[in-house]
Image (tube, helix red, strand yellow):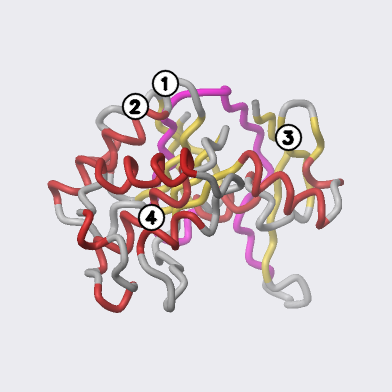
Amino acid sequence: MFKVKDITMIYDMESDEKSFALKGFDLELPDKGLIGIIGPSGSGKSTLMYCLSTLKKPVEGSILYNDRELTEISSKEREVLRRQEFGFIFQKHYLIPYMGAMDNVMVASMNQGFEAREKARTFLKNLGIKDKEFRKKPSKLSGGQCQRVAIARAMINDPKVVFADEPTASLDHENAYNVMNILKEYSKDRLVLVVTHDRSILDGADRIIEMWDGEITEA
């Protein structure tokens, strides 16, 4: 699904001391499976995910997604691709503060009908959000509950790729385990990329990519 060639990302381009977030490596990823990307802060793992998902554009290199060169498509094409085929789970939940939990999931749905709402309901319940909490705004939910709502939002359109950046960081052990089980089940037919510094949540991963200082040290 993804074929990365000589991907390079440099920050502080105008500075005499340029910061290399990604140092020109190659990588291939399949069309399904749970893939963990692990490494310490500053290793480049989140930058790699942002480049793959078109949220950032590398300084050099090629990123093919189903034979489509992502570094050459327009802003509009990137927006459509992200909405139709990608799902995002970030460390911060980025929920809309004036909407309830259910509406925060449904706002991302391309289908606003009854079936989509029932799908959202199922996702929320599987993630431990109760019926009585569906109308609660983010300020009335715990941090862990907000994160679980964000996970349901990411999956509502059945994306072909789920990009998850530290998805369990704000969850207790039990809920983190539940979320990873849901992502693992989803990865049977789709690609799920999990960026983390916590190796324990990757016990069921199909593959682990280790990064250090902008390079892949093991894949």
Position of residue 107 measured from the top left corner of the image (x, y, whole percent): 53, 59
**Mark 4 or mark 2: which comes first in sequence?**
4
What is the CA distance from the residue labelled 4 to the residue labelled 2? 27 Å
Q: Nearer the viewer, mark 4 or mark 2?
A: 2
Query: Residue at (74%, 48%) from the top-left corner?
Result: 80
Q: Is residue 62 toward the left or the right of residue 170 in the image?
A: right
Q: Amino acid at mark 3?
A: Lys
Q: Tell me the element at label 4.
A: loop
Q: Which residue is more in the foreground, 182 or 164?
A: 182
Question: In this picture, is 59 found above or below 15?
Answer: above
What is the CA distance from the residue labelled 4 to the residue labelled 3? 23 Å
Query: Residue at (65%, 38%) from the top-left corner?
Result: 25
Q: Which residue is mark 4?
A: 40
**Mark 1 or mark 4: which comes first in sequence?**
4
Looking at the image, the residue that sits furthest to the left is 174
Please say if the residues under marks 1 and 2 sit with CB atoms less than 8 Å apart.
yes
Q: Which residue is mark 3?
A: 5
Q: Which residue is mark 1?
A: 188
Q: Amino acid at mark 2?
A: Glu
Q: Nearer the viewer, mark 3 or mark 2?
A: 2
Question: In this picture, is 157 found above or below 74?
Answer: above
What is the CA distance from the residue labelled 3 to the residue labelled 2? 30 Å
What is the CA distance from the residue labelled 1 to the residue labelled 2? 6 Å
* Main secondary-structure element of the magenta-colored stretch: strand
Tag shown at residue 185: 2
Please say if the residues under marks 1 and 3 sit with CB atoms less than 8 Å apart.
no
Q: How many marks?
A: 4
Q: Quadrant of residue 65?
A: top right
Position of residue 165 measured from the top left corner of the image (x, y, whole percent): 44, 53
Which residues, given as a range, are shown in magenta? Answer: 18-43
Q: Tell me the element at label 3.
A: strand
